[in-house]
Image: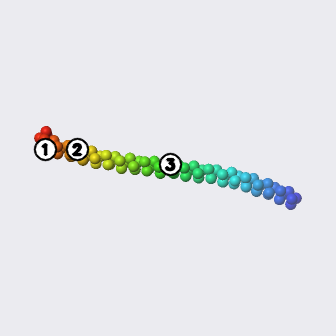
Amino acid sequence: MTDNVLDYLREQFARVHQRLDAIDRRLDETTKRLTSIEREIAGMQRTLADRAETAVNDRTRMDDFDNRLSRIERRLELM
């Protein structure tokens, strides 16, 4: 009788162990995928920040060109 109970408990613990192994593998896979997604998002944020900086620089340059053109037009009395 005791042997039957011990065998049953061993079998149940083996099943629990197998399920925990499966859960552990899925958790590892999910963690890797999440890390990959986080890296991708960080890359996109850097790209957006770079583009925003470029846009600001381009706007500043265009404003400078506009100011210079206005000065030239005034000097040539084209306005």
- Name the residue at the bottom extreme: 2
Residue depth check, mark 3 versus mark 1: number of the one nearer the observer: 1
Q: Which mark is residue 66?
A: 2
Residue beneath label 1, please? 75
Q: Residues within 10 Å of mark 1 (few under 14, many from 20)?
A: few
* Mark closer to the chain start, 2 or 1: 2
Left or right, 77 with respect to 44, comes to left
Extreme residue toward the left, this view:
77
Cα distance, mark 2 to mark 3?
Answer: 39 Å
Q: Amino acid at mark 2?
A: Asp
Disc 3 target residue: 40
Marked residue nearer the N-terminal end (3 or 1): 3
Q: Is residue 42 left or right of residue 67?
A: right
Q: Is residue 74 above or below residue 11?
A: above
Quarter of the image for the C terminus: give it: top left
Q: Is residue 7 above or below residue 40?
A: below
Q: Residue at x 86, y 60 (%)?
A: 2
Residue at 66% over, 51% down: 25
**Callout 2: SS:** helix
The answer to whether residue 34 is left or right of residue 49 is right
Q: Residue at x 43, y 50 (%)?
A: 46
* Residue 64 in the figure: left or right of residue 16: left
Q: Total of numbered circles in the picture?
A: 3
Q: Earlier in the sequence, mark 2 or mark 3?
A: 3
The mark lying in front, picked from 2 and 3, is: 2
